[in-house]
Amino acid sequence: MLKQSFLLAAVSFSLVAAAGADTVQLKDKATVVGTILAEKRDQVVVDIGYTVLTIPRNQIVKLSHGSSSKAVVESSKPVETTPVKIPTPEPIAPSQIAQAHAGLYAANSKAMPIRAVRDLVNQLGEAVVQVRTPSGLGSGFIINEDGFLMTNFHVIEGETQISVEVYHQKNGMLDRVSYKQVRIIAMNKFEDLALLKIDDKDAPKFKFVLMGNADALSVGEHVFAIGSPLGLERTVTEGILSTKTRQLSGELYLQTTTQINPGNSGGPLFNMAGEVIGITNMKITFGEGLGFAIPV
């Protein structure tokens, strides 16, 4: 189900700042009080508690850090804002990742070369799966050779019978295998994520994807998805990254022109190095080229 979205277009409210809060004085005599998350050359990112504001530098008169005085945020003029993702800590070294996550997933330790979608699809196809339940189907992707895989929570919500269809390559041909012993390892309804594991006794070692970093992407970069839209397995669609910070129902998503339809849910969105940088989970049904993915 499509989640309703909104854009904060005006600041017209009053708040009392706690001790230690940062203060941003604007040209129109408005004051924004919160925690400054980042100070960039052209903008300042401020967490005001229930959302994050990006304020252009050319609108700022003064920055005050750690002010202990009470302040009021008031404005009669609209202040256009854009939601942004809160900055994350520095990436963990690959050796630390292996130790911290016990080999649950893998990531490249250095930037990988850009490749053609044609070549990447042949390499990645086996790791993208179809997730089936009695009430519907979605997509998913395997994150390690032991059969752990990611999908959306809404794909398996309320289900106890889950099967996963994998397309193994044998002698240049695709062999479709359905695994019935699938266990739910973890679920997060609020982030729309689920971790599953294929437990069939005769299951082989699986081909898996490498995880990337959505923060490293730039708007306009090419991306592509593999999934099962409307049950059409192994469908490949390509597009660009439209924005990295689309706010929907309080969460930030990657927006892409890559075509996404029911059945793509839970499938991977790849960068052109073949790394997963998003998990596709919804689209706007009354528009074209308006797909969304949970950022990695």
Image (tube, helix red, strand yellow):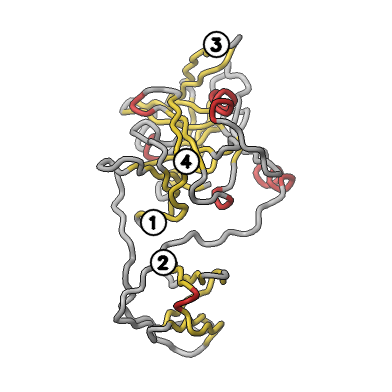
Q: Residues within 10 Å of mark 2 (few under 14, many from 20)?
A: few
> Which numbered disc, 2 or 3, marks the residue that appears first in the sequence?
2
> Mark 2 to mark 4: distance in Å?
23 Å
Read off the residue under disc 3. 173
The answer to whether residue 31 is left or right of residue 102 is left
State whether residue 13 is above or below residue 97: below
In this figure, which residue is indicated by the disc labeled 4?
279
Mark pair 4, 1: CA separation: 16 Å
Q: Residue at x 57, y 70 (%)?
A: 41
As measured in the structure, the alpha-carbon distance from the residue carrying label 4 to the one carrying label 3 is 27 Å
Check disc 2 and report its element: helix, strand or loop: loop
Look at label 2 and name its amino acid: Thr
Q: Which mark is residue 134?
A: none
Callout 3 amino acid: Met
For this view, does 183 lie left or right of residue 72?
Answer: right
Q: Position of residue 133 (x, y in %)?
A: 37, 27
Q: CA distance from mark 2 to mark 1?
A: 10 Å
Task: Residue 238 in the image: state x and y as whole percent.
Answer: 45, 34
The residue at which mark 1 appears reads as: 247
Nearer the camera: disc 2 or disc 1: 1
